[in-house]
Image (cartoon, rainbow, N blue to C red):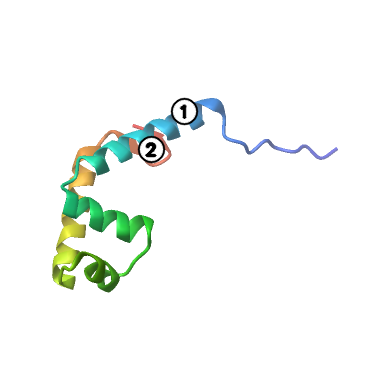
Amino acid sequence: MLEVQDTRPNPEALHLAEIDRQLLQNAIQELPEEFREAILLRELEGLSYKEIGAITGAPIGTVMSRLARARHRLEKALAGRISRGGVA
């Protein structure tokens, strides 16, 4: 007889994922507005640097700088708090 494995996330995994989402959302909200805008347009909306520049009125170099700084701040804010696959 073929045994079917349950691949649904367990309640603990779902809870840990929700905690991770909250930590990330809070860290994004703490970014300066120009960094937050750039990171959301790039990572959530999938816009190109050129498109972000057109929306924000910033040169592409500035967009790139804002994204790099936003990513660095997020990495620093979340270091040790979120791990791949769950909470550290």
Q: Residue at x 24, y 41 (%)?
A: 29
> Is residue 83 shown above or below 10?
below
Q: Residue at x 18, y 72 (%)?
A: 60
**Quick one: which residue is furthest to the right in this view?**
1
> Is residue 11 shown above or below 76?
above
Secondary structure state at the residue bearing disc 2: helix
Quarter of the view holding residue 44: bottom left
Choose between 57 and 4: the one closer to the eye.
57
- Looking at the rendered image, the quarter that the N terminus falls into is top right
> Is residue 15 shown above or below 37?
above
Count of numbered labels shown in the rendering:
2
Q: Which of the two labelled residues, at mark 1 and mark 2, occupies the earlier sequence position?
A: 1
Q: Which mark is residue 21?
A: 2
Q: Residue at x 38, y 37 (%)?
A: 21
Choose between 42 and 51: the one closer to the eye.
51
Residue 15 coordinates in the image, percent (x, y): 46, 28
**Quick one: which residue is furthest to the top in this view?**
12
Q: Which mark is residue 54?
A: none
Question: In the rendered structure, which amino acid carries the disc numbered 1?
Answer: His
Residue 8 coordinates in the image, percent (x, y): 62, 36
Quarter of the view holding residue 58: bottom left
Label 2 neighbour load within 10 Å: few <14, some 14-19, many 20+: few
Indicate left or right for 38 with 17 as reference: left
| Residue of label 1 | 15
Residue 38 coordinates in the image, percent (x, y): 24, 58
Q: CA distance from mark 1 to mark 2?
A: 10 Å
Question: In the rendered structure, which amino acid carries the disc numbered 2?
Answer: Arg
Choose between 30 and 2: the one closer to the eye.
30
